[in-house]
Image (cartoon, grey):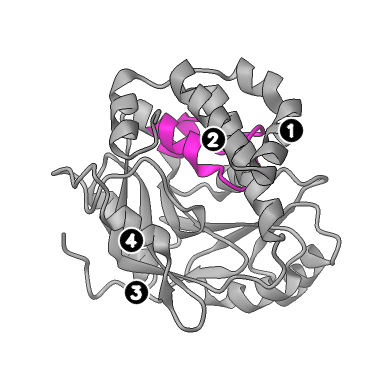
Amino acid sequence: MTVDPSATSPDRSDVTIVVASQNRRDELLTTLPRHEAPVVLVDNASTDGTADAVRTAHPEVTVITLGRNVGARARTVGVARAGTPFVAFADDDSWWAPGDLARAVALMRAHPRLAVLNARILVGPEERLDPTCREMAASPLGTEPDLPGPSLLGFVACGALVRTEAFEAVGGFDSVVRFPGEEERLALDLATAGWAIAYVHEVTVHHHPSVRRHAPGRRQAAIWRSRVLTAVMRHHVPELAAVLRDAVRAGRPGLEGLLRAVPDLPGALRRRRPIPPRLRADLHLLGRGTA
């Protein structure tokens, strides 16, 4: 794979950066100037004056304000407004490295089956490699001939460039899973539809985690909630049973996640479409099938 070393800023008609945020005004005012493409900010019902502050400091940013927090679904709203063939996701505390968004767009154009390009993610001022990137680089699925890097069945949203056509064809992020852990259902639906996801180590996203983060226990419960709801929507009975079993074994976070999933079970069941056999085999290869 070759990345064009002369690429700098992407063409404004090619890509939009979509940021979903809630109550992180200060982080946004720091990171927004770092973006090298037009930005759509979707504000998830912030109460700290985020929208007004961004409109004043960065009038070039398109700001969409939502009446309630819809989690990751806000990104789907942003993609619909973007109107470009590619959309790069960024969090309020992350940004693409200079020149790398243009390189990522060029790679997407060169690999038409690629729906999601997951960049290398460097964390904090010390630029530590996100451990998830090591896992993606060593994906047991290997590298298919028509892809620029190892094949994946998942991604990290803050480091992802997506093809709008593919994203919208599978419905984007839904109103059931929300956040965090929203990527799994979308990844499975893209793979079911024949699209591909790949990790590309040669392009970089910087992530300086905000100090305004949920307590670890609360975040783990939210992740378990997403796992359970995704399993209800997309996994076959043996895999679903394994997720439920693992949630119980995880103790308080898993049990809390199960309880938090209950109100959304009817919506998950209405959207239930189990994945095809070929994807079940890939999940087992990745260690995400039944144990």
Point 59% across, 74% down: residue:
31
For marks 1 and 3 on the same chain, the one whose residue lies earlier in the sequence = 3
Identity of the amino acid at label 1?
Leu
x, y percentage for residue 15?
44, 56
For marks 4 and 3 on the same chain, the one whose residue lies earlier in the sequence = 3
Point 35% across, 69% down: residue:
100
Q: Is residue 191 left or right of residue 232?
A: left
| Quadrant of the drawing holding the C terminus | top left
Identity of the amino acid at label 3?
Thr
Gap between marks 4 and 3, in whole Å? 26 Å
Q: Which residues are magenta?
A: 166-190
Furthest residue in direction left, as rendered: 145
- Closer to viewer: mark 2 or mark 3: 2
User: Tag 3, which secondary structure?
Assistant: loop
For marks 2 and 3 on the same chain, the one whose residue lies earlier in the sequence = 3
x, y percentage for residue 33?
58, 77
Residue behind mark 2: 246
Gap between marks 2 and 1, in whole Å? 14 Å
Residue behind mark 4: 134
Furthest residue in direction bottom, as rendered: 126
x, y percentage for residue 282?
29, 32
Q: Is there a contact, CB below 8 Å, between mark 2 and mark 4?
A: no
Point 23% across, 53% down: residue:
149
For marks 2 and 4 on the same chain, the one whose residue lies earlier in the sequence = 4
Residue behind mark 3: 8
Question: How busy is the neighbourhood of tag 1: few (under 14 within 10 Å), some, or many (20 plus)?
Answer: few
Residue behind mark 1: 259
User: Tag 2, which secondary structure?
Assistant: helix
Identity of the amino acid at label 2?
Asp
- Closer to viewer: mark 4 or mark 3: 4
